[in-house]
Amino acid sequence: MRGASHAKWAAGAVAVALAATACGGGDDSGGGGGGGGGDGVVRSSWGDPQNPLEPANTNEVQGGKVMDMIFRGLKRYDPKTGKAEDMLAEKFATKDSTTFTVTVKDGWTFSNGEKVTAKSFVDAWNYGASLKNNQKNAYFFGYIEGYEKVHPESGKQSADTLSGLKATGPRTFTVKLNQKFSTWPETLGYAAFAPLPQAFFKNHAAWVKKPVGNGPYTVRSYRKGSQMSLRKWAKYPGSDKARNDGVDLKVYTDNNTAYTDLTAGNLDLVDDVPAAQLRNVRADLGDRYLNTPAGIIQTLAFPFYDKDWPDDAKGAKLRKGLSMAINRKQITETIFQKTRTPATDWTSPVLGEDGGYKPGLCGDACDYKPAEARKLVKEGGGLPGGQVKIGYNADTGSHKDWVDAVCNSINKALGQSKACVGNPTGTFADFRNKTSQQKMDGPFRAGWQMDYPLIQNFLQPLYYTNASSNDGKWSNKEFDKLVNEANAESDAAAAVKKFQQAEEVVRDNMAAIPLWYQNGSAGYSDRVSDVALNPFSVPVYNEIKVG
Amino acid sequence: MSEHGPAGGVPEDSAMAPTGMGGAMDLAAEEGASLEKRPGPDGTGPEAKPRSLWSDAWRDLRRNPVFLISALIILFLVVISLWPSLIASRDPLDCDLANAQKGSAPGHPFGFDGQGCDVYTRTVYGARASVTVGVCATLGVALLGSVLGGLAGFFGGFWDAILSRVTDIFFAIPVVLGGLVLLSVVTSSTVWPVIGFIVLLGWPQISRIARGAVITAKQNDYVQAARALGASNSRMLLRHITPNAVAPVIVVATIALGTYIALEATLSYLGVGLKPPTVSWGIDISSASQIIRTAPHALLWPAGALAITVLAFIMLGDAVRDALDPKLR
Amino acid sequence: MGRYVIRRLLQMIPVFIGATLLIFLMVNVMGDPIAGLCGDRQCDPATAAQLRKEFGLDKPVWQQYLTYMGNVFTGDLGTAFNGQQVTELMADSWPITARLTLIAILIELVVGITLGVVTGLRRGRPVDTGVLLATLVVISIPTFVTGLLLQLLLGVKWGWIKPAVSTDAEFSELLVPGLVLASLSLAYVTRLTRTSIAENRRADYIRTAIAKGVPRRRVVVRHLLRNSLIPVVTFIGTDIGALMGGAIVTERIFNIHGVGYQLYQGILRQNTQTVVGFVTVLVLVFLVANLLVDLLYAVLDPRIRYV
């Protein structure tokens, strides 16, 4: 009948298309054809940065790529280990873990020839912290004394510069913190702490159009919304010189399209392989595919402000029961094709065990045990209203797939086909509004991408009473106390231990259900080699070789 | 200009002698009209009982095999929408990720989708939401659109200007924006908000089509003749204009039916459509599209069901249109 | 005629004001967009307040609207959240979309009307059935899939086209995307033409023309087609705006930085100024398109007159 011939047509078309992509990877005759640029230039996919490209205003990966290429700060996180290494810093000196004297290395300049001095840092940080500049990463400077004056929670700022920040010489400056923070220098690898040249302040509009920094690349041209061409800065004084002639970042409307362009040989690097293509990656790219851990953990948070989800012993049982009803292994293998790893604690493997990552800390509660799950949910008083709704935003990140899978898993474990349903919100902004204004009525997705590779960053902002990203409004005196103690600890190993004790409090109350650790994934053409992703899932561009 | 079109069809001339365009039609219509106007023994029709255009159409339809086939398919769709368990014994929400994307297996003739749900069961169960959305939204759009557009086209002038400009504004509302604004506040988990939304954003198109068709139809000689004979507005609209303006509306509506079923999926994709765990073809088609390269069978069946539904309604539309067109008799 | 056109142009003023107000309110209803700018964390309240002030979001809606309209008349359409001028975004995306739409409309006209005439004249024959089946495929397979398959076949396997359109988006690059974009409308145009042709071919004037010995081709083109085009023209008039503003899927698949894509982004990021700016231009497109359609009625059917 008609349906049948229709089916045949579709099947035929699909078969041809499948065959098409199976051999797609081999064709890379393009060379530099696609994006202009020369032979030694890497053509990489990009997304339009959400915010203007300023170091203290860049809080997502797309802008982060550029920052990583055109800036070097006092510290740099080793692309492989994630450890904070001195970059422009010659030394940090402190006696009390509160006041630090920083010495900047000699011989560094911005690509416009201006010397990088202590003033370059002090001015940049003052700019970043100042409320009137609208920098979204201003909170990074919150540990520096005087922050509340330049960035009050409400009202007008009463100072333009941080009182705790003073240039004491051409290459030295002092930083006074408002609390003890022994590992504070380790946080300085983040782009927000980059130095800025005077051109940034004198002609800001021009600078934003074509940023100038001190990193291994310079911006040759920038057409907003479509392409940025970066070229190797030949006189770059650092040791991590670019090993290619440059990078062309091309904005794609969709990462699927970027991936297709990669298989067609028009692109060299796609640093976010779309979930829908993960099953094809081996066929399309062979070994030219990366899947490496990144400092991102996905959890389910709970609305502790809602009377249905109380923070008591019963509630903890219910949450633990739900956690045990989620078949993490199956979901990470099937939906995510192993680009996620089942979580067994609340941090991330990129910290390393010395840094505080402790696999298995979650124990049984993170294993799939349907029978026990049923029992615990029952003991916990059953599902409020007979149904859990998992909140997520529909517009970014294809969350629907895994939320549906989690729900199916819970339904199967509990033996009811409607025990769990997804509860999408249209836009990310709306979702954020709902979570931050405490309007959620069930568990909701919570993703955390680390700012710096410290265990502190995975716990304090998320679970400390009233912390900035504690969207579930969980509050626990014991946890707060342990975190305070950990921060005051001057010995790094002892601090990590204290943090882990705090993490155990999170576990015992199941303040959030850990789902999985997210990996960075990338595919690349056979024109390039030595491709790697750093722990922030940003490609390490300067190490890529072409040809 | 004079060599084309209804040769020399200046309304005033032909008003007296309805021999212009579509002669047979005119005669039949006028006959019916005069019969109703002056019921009585002087009926000139071959049958004693006066036949209206509409009853003629119905008689034609019943004998049309195209109509019968399409009616049969639609009946089948209605039955499985009401009682899906008649032909599917599984639970459409019973999904095992271990089976994700697998091909057909014993007891699962159509294979599994990306979540490991049985494609056959979901296709059967998806009919209810999809057919309801498609049919109700299309009916709503067609009614609202053709009434408003028809009136605008018929009366012209001031009311046309107002109605047409309102359509222009409605046209400009992006579906994504409208959906996010209007549907995100809805908590009902039924299909009605989605249908209401589609009607709200869909009517302008039909309205424009209907308006254009009415503007053309009212130029026809027999309409002018009826007007000259003193027929009332409502009479002219119903008897003379509607049958001649309905064809393009039917064509657009039957195709739109399919697109509305797909639009429902777009809305669900935005998180504002049918609320989970509702099963629909639209949702399944859109999620199967993502895995088209590895599991095309997951797309094939819900899309095939959609195609057959649209086919049935296109055939139905064709049959109805033919029945209303006396020139084809 | 002249007075009619002037009257129609004057009607654009209330529509313009009404549409901008409506869209302005709609985007506003979506809530506070600032929360979406800080990633998966809460914006610090002071910065959020400051940003709100900068974008004028702290004022009452009517005041925001008046300020916006005031700025519009000085040529300032506001700024997107990433710091880009809306006028700049428009200058980048409108020409691309105009080209894409032009291609799609041409395809609809040429292919759609040809298929419509052929199937209308040969109702029930194999060619009619074949086109009907193709129509069903187009309706039931999402654009996303047809686009993707074409991209994989033509772009990756055979290398006839580049899978992704470059920034310049020249005509030749937009042919395949234009075809994908046009495919659904093609179904409408084909079936509308088919029905009109089938309806009109039995009309007296056609019989007369044939009886007079007018060559068949001439009958079809000059008499039959011309009188059958009104519904088709009406449809295309309503379609232009939809193609321009609603090409979200096509534009995403083929990497076209056009109006549909920008509008979609603007809506998801709840950026009032981007959305209102783009939609306003879309309204104008609709108004002009519909005016042209109404004028075309009179050309296609001289009995229709405007005063």
Image (spheres, grey):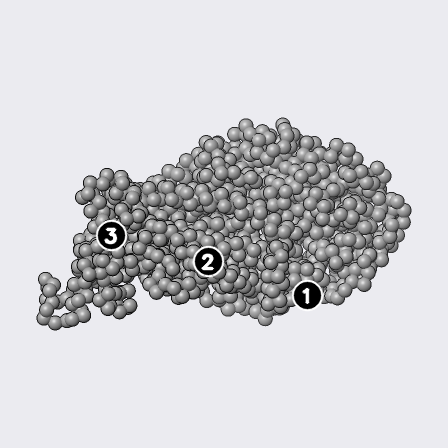
Q: CA distance from mark 3 to mark 1?
A: 87 Å
The kind of residue on which mark 1 rests is Ser
The kind of residue on which mark 3 rests is Gly
Residue B44 appears in the figure? yes
Residue at image mark 1: A475
Q: Nearer the viewer, residue C7 or C278?
A: C7
* Image side of residue A373 versus residue B48, left or right: right
| Quarter of the picture holding the N terminus of chain A | top left
Instruction: Indicate the quadrant where residue C65 lies.
Output: bottom right
* Image side of residue B164 versus residue A172, left or right: left
Residue at image mark 2: C6
Percent across and percent down for residue A371 are: 51, 58
Seen in the picture, residue A346 relative to C25 is either above or below; the reply is above
Percent across and percent down for residue A347 are: 67, 52
User: Which element is circle 2 on?
Assistant: helix
Instruction: Tell me if label 3 and label 2 are in contact, CB under 8 Å.
Output: no
How crowded is the residue under tag 3: few (<14 C-alpha within 10 Å), some, or many (20+)?
A: few
Residue A128 disc label: none
Rendered residue at 68%/32% (across/down): A244
Instruction: Indicate the quadrant where residue B198 lies.
Output: bottom left
Q: Nearer the viewer, residue A215 or C91?
A: C91
Seen in the picture, residue C258 relative to B130 is either above or below; the reply is above
Percent across and percent down for residue A537 are: 64, 44
Q: CA distance from mark 3 to mark 2?
A: 31 Å
Q: CA distance from mark 2 to mark 1?
A: 67 Å
Mark 3 or mark 1: which is in front? 3
Residue A84 appears in the figure? no
Judging from the image, mark 3 belongs to the subunit labelled B
The kind of residue on which mark 2 rests is Ile
Residue B8 disc label: 3
How crowded is the residue under tag 2: few (<14 C-alpha within 10 Å), some, or many (20+)?
A: few
